[in-house]
């Protein structure tokens, strides 16, 4: 965020630094940027932005394995989990079968009737 702020401030200020002082007065009187300080507006907006905390989520696996000595199995809600206190990246979750594979498909669900 700080590098973005520096880039925006530099791009706003750089064209005015290349002009003569007499031209600078004319530009500033008609410029919208002279009325609003863009750098201060962007700097004040950054602290109010929400901070995202990185979090390890479960990997859905067909076969669960212990990856280190601290990993352990736990069953909750008819699903097995592998949890690890030392390495958050070892967390695994048993993949549940998709319900669509167990649908009973009849003649009514095949689509429009074909007249052969």
Image (spheres, rainbow, N blue to C red):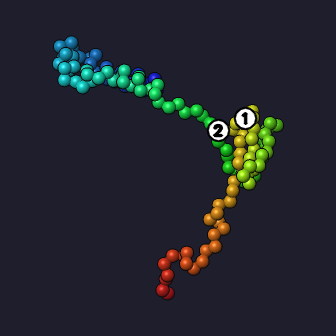
Q: Is residue 63 visible?
A: yes
Which x, y percent locates residue 93?
A: 71, 48
Q: In the rendered image, which quarter is residue 78 located in? A: bottom right
Residue at far bottom of view: 116
Relative to 106, 30 lies left or right: left
Q: Is residue 68 above or below residue 4?
A: below
Q: CA distance from mark 1 to mark 2?
A: 10 Å
Residue corresponding to mark 2: 56
Counting the numbered discs, the total is 2
Q: Residue at x 72, y 40 (%)?
A: 90
Secondary structure of the residue carrying numbered label 2: loop
Q: Is residue 64 visible?
A: no
Relative to 75, 13 lies left or right: left
10 Å crowding of disc 1: few (<14), some (14-19), many (20+): few
Q: Residue at x 19, y 20 (%)?
A: 29
Question: Which of the marked residues, 1 or 2, is nearer the chain's N terminus?
Answer: 2
Which x, y percent locates residue 84?
A: 75, 38
Residue 87, label in figure: 1
Q: Residue at x 21, y 12 (%)?
A: 21
Which x, y percent locates residue 96?
A: 69, 56
Q: Residue at x 17, y 19 (%)?
A: 26
Secondary structure of the residue carrying numbered label 1: loop
Q: In the rendered image, which quarter is residue 95 located in? A: bottom right
10 Å crowding of disc 2: few (<14), some (14-19), many (20+): few
Residue 102, label in figure: none
Q: Is residue 87 above or below residue 2?
A: below
Relative to 15, 90 lies left or right: right
Is the residue under label 2 in contact with that under label 1 (CB below 8 Å)?
no
Relative to 41, 68 lies left or right: right
């Amino acid at each position: 965020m700080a590098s973005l702020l520096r880039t925006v401030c530099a791009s706003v200020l750089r064209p005015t630094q290349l002009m003569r002082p007499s031209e600078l007065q004319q530009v500033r009187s008609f410029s919208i940027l002279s009325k609003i300080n863009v750098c201060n507006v962007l700097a004040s907006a950054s602290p109010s932005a929400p901070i995202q905390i990185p979090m390890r989520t479960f990997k859905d696996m067909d076969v669960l394995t212990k990856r280190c000595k601290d990993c352990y199995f736990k069953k909750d809600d008819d699903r097995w989990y592998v949890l690890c206190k030392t390495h958050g990246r070892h967390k695994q979750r048993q993949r549940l079968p998709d319900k669509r594979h167990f649908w009973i498909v009849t003649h009514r669900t095949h689509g429009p009737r074909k007249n052969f």
